[in-house]
Image (spheres, grey):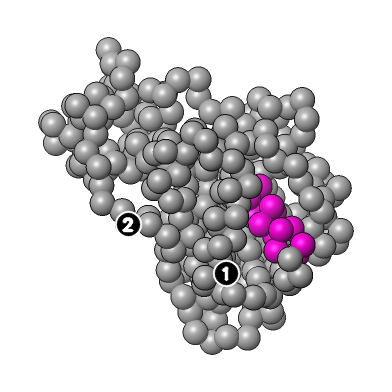
């Protein structure tokens, strides 16, 4: 099963799902390249999609492919699936987790926080799993805020690097969102949705929004959680059980891959001074 990275560019989001998958299901997660995160101002959606396709083909040259996408990875996962099919490859399994088609005239659905400082703080709190608002008081430059936290020992250089990297990936994904023009996936889709909020909007949306872009049946499951809580243990246990039911009959290999593909382990860069 190939896990397409979420908006922060990391396939690590799926690590909580892995323990709940049957050991016979191989798992791999390509990462957003560091170069794209820090120098992706001119990157196009097609270039990003083709990068992931190339990484997938390095791991598995031909189908049948089994894909899953969470958050921004939902949109990219669907795009990769339809592209692979256009190349004559079989995509036997596609699971989409709580994201919806980009529709003309609705660019605000996927808006990120309005300023870099707010986004950096949001990602820092997600990664550290604790409130950090106090550390950003009277600060307007996210790089300087992170550097101060490194200097006083609150976070490490590596943590500051990953916060900056994930922030840049979110900004890149948000910039590319309006570029999506969805082709039609030939097959069934397994869909998981949050029941309280989706992405950065309070308006609940329907899995049936994917119907024009799927030829087969959309099997939807609701989870009692916010979008950003879907990868917590209680929810990943439910998703893992359901994925096993759908995917295990398709899996013939007995070996298991627990791999993060790409340059996710790149050397940390220090926070800006």
Mark 1 surroundings within 10 Å by alpha-carbon count, few (fewer than 14), some (14 through 19), many (20 or more): some
Provide residue 252's location: percent of width, then percent of height.
Answer: 63, 86
Is residue 12 left or right of 247 when viewed as pictured? left
In the depicted view, which residue is nearer to us: 238 or 257? 257
Name the residue that disc number 2 marks.
265
The residue depicted at 68 percent of the width and 37 percent of the height is 179
For the stretch drawn in magenta, the main secondary structure is helix
Image height of 227 relative to 246, above or below: above
Element marked by disc 1 = helix
Residue 131 bears which disc, if any?
A: none
Provide residue 184's location: percent of width, then percent of height.
Answer: 82, 54
In the depicted view, which residue is nearer to us: 95 or 78? 78
Image height of 8 relative to 218, above or below: above
Front label number (1 vs 2): 1
Q: How many marks?
A: 2
Q: Is residue 183 visible?
A: yes
Is residue 118 left or right of 46 when viewed as pictured? left
Is residue 174 left or right of 158 when viewed as pictured? right
Image height of 63 relative to 211, above or below: below
Name the residue that disc number 1 marks.
57
Give residue 148's quadrant in the image: top left
Element marked by disc 2 = loop
Task: Indicate which disc, 1 or 2, sits on the residue closer to the N terminus.
Answer: 1
Q: Is residue 97 visible?
A: no
Magenta stretch: give its range: 74-86
Mark 2 surroundings within 10 Å by alpha-carbon count, few (fewer than 14), some (14 through 19), many (20 or more): few
Provide residue 66's location: percent of width, then percent of height.
Answer: 64, 69
Q: Is residue 78 magenta?
A: yes
Q: Are marks 1 and 2 in contact (CB under 8 Å)?
A: no
Quadrant housing the C terminus: top left
Provide residue 225's location: percent of width, then percent of height.
Answer: 58, 44
């Amino acid at each position: 099963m190939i896990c397409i990275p979420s908006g922060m560019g990391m396939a690590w989001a799926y690590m909580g799902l892995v323990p709940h998958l049957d050991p016979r299901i191989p798992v791999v997660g390509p990462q957003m390249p560091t170069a794209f995160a820090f120098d992706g101002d001119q990157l196009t959606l097609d270039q990003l999609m083709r990068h992931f396709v190339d990484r997938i083909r390095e791991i598995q040259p031909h189908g049948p492919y089994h894909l899953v996408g969470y958050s921004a990875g939902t949109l990219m996962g669907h795009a990769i699936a339809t592209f692979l099919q256009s190349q004559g490859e079989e995509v036997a399994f596609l699971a989409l987790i709580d994201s919806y088609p980009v529709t003309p005239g609705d660019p605000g659905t996927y808006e990120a926080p309005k300023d870099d400082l707010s986004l950096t703080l949001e990602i820092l709190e997600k990664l550290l799993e604790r409130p950090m608002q106090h550390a950003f008081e009277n600060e307007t430059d996210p790089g300087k805020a992170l550097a101060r936290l490194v200097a006083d020992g609150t976070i490490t250089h590596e943590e500051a690097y990953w916060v900056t990297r994930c922030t840049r990936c979110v900004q890149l994904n948000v910039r590319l969102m309006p570029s999506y023009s969805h082709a039609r996936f030939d097959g069934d889709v397994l869909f998981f949705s949050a029941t309280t909020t989706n992405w950065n909007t309070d308006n609940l949306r329907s899995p049936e929004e994917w119907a024009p872009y799927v030829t087969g049946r959309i099997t939807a499951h609701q989870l009692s959680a916010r979008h950003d809580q879907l990868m917590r243990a209680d929810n990943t246990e439910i998703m893992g059980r359901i994925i096993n039911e759908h995917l295990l009959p398709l899996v013939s290999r007995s070996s298991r891959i627990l791999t993060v593909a790409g340059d996710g382990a790149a050397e940390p860069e220090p926070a800006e001074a």
